[in-house]
Image: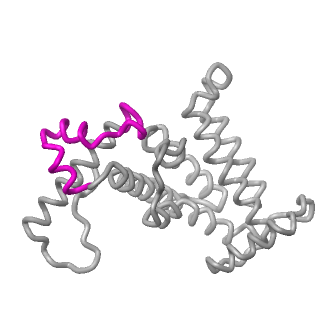
Amino acid sequence: MRSPLSFRHDDRVPTARERIRAELTAEITDAARRQLAEVGAAALSLRAVARELGMVSSAVYRYFPSRDDLLTALIIDCYNELGEVAEQAVTSAEGGLLEKWLAYAHAIRDWALAHPADYLLIYGTPVPGYQAPPDTVGPASRTTTVILGMLIQGGFGAELKDDVPLPPGLDAEMRRAMEAIGVGVPSALLARGMTAWIQLFGVITFELNGRFNNFIDETRREFFDHQMRVMARHVGM
């Protein structure tokens, strides 16, 4: 379970009111994640969360004024949780870039299989009527930052001579994006990295949505590992 207290700006001891608020906020989001697994994001209800916790709905609204505010908190929690899993997998992996990439990929899949509703909240079908605010961008970028770091470390060795040329407009857009985030890799390599990233999450999403049923049942981990090794070769790992 997540720690309900997080004070990044100073080391002061939180007040009793702050502790209570942090603990209740964590209880609300934990209950909402349980409801998410039962009914899905579109049916998430502040009133139902309040009933589970034995609270009046008006009390929950003091913490989350709307369902969208609660959804945003859940999305940020899930992105950060998955980002931490991915970062730790790469940090603790032994070996070279291939081993780090495989550790990264399998850690994301393992988390997704253990938390399917949470994964589908952030990588599944968008919730009707919900618009994610800018607050979600930083947490969402944690997993992509890891793969970008691996590209920078080792992707320059990729053989790109036989690559399908990028259309001029796409090439220019990728160069602008790299300038904005301060990264300098060949745009063709970045395109390959995006292919690997899409393949990673695409295979996981297919698995969670039952697309492999009656086709690949007993060897899904082996299939996933094979796909990730193919992508590693694609980007020069």
Residue for point 68% across, 66% down: 151
Answer above or below: position of 31 versus 73. above
Indicate left or right for 9 with 199 as reference: left
Main SS of residues in magenta: helix
Residue for point 23% across, 40% down: 47
Q: Is residue 52 magenta?
A: yes
Find residue 71 and report its horizontal and vertical position in percent.
38, 50
Q: State how many labels appear.
A: 0
Q: Quadrant of the C terminus?
A: bottom right
Residue for point 58% across, 27% down: 210
Q: Which residues are magenta?
A: 36-64
Answer above or below: position of 20 versus 106. below
Find residue 139 and report its horizontal and vertical position in percent.
46, 63
Hey, which residue is sitting farthest front in the picture?
129
In the depicted view, which residue is nearer to us: 231 or 59?
Answer: 59
Q: Is residue 26 magenta?
A: no
Indicate left or right for 64 with 16 as reference: right
Find residue 180 and report its horizontal and vertical position in percent.
64, 78
Find residue 76 and report its horizontal and vertical position in percent.
40, 57
In the depicted view, which residue is nearer to us: 9 or 48?
Answer: 48
Q: How is the image coloured?
A: one colour
User: In terms of image quadrants, where is residue 12?
Assistant: bottom left
Q: Is residue 111 visible?
A: no
In the depicted view, which residue is nearer to us: 40 or 13?
Answer: 40
In the depicted view, which residue is nearer to us: 228 or 52?
Answer: 52
Q: Is residue 173 visible?
A: yes
User: In terms of image quadrants, where is residue 194?
Assistant: bottom right
Residue for point 14% across, 66% down: 18
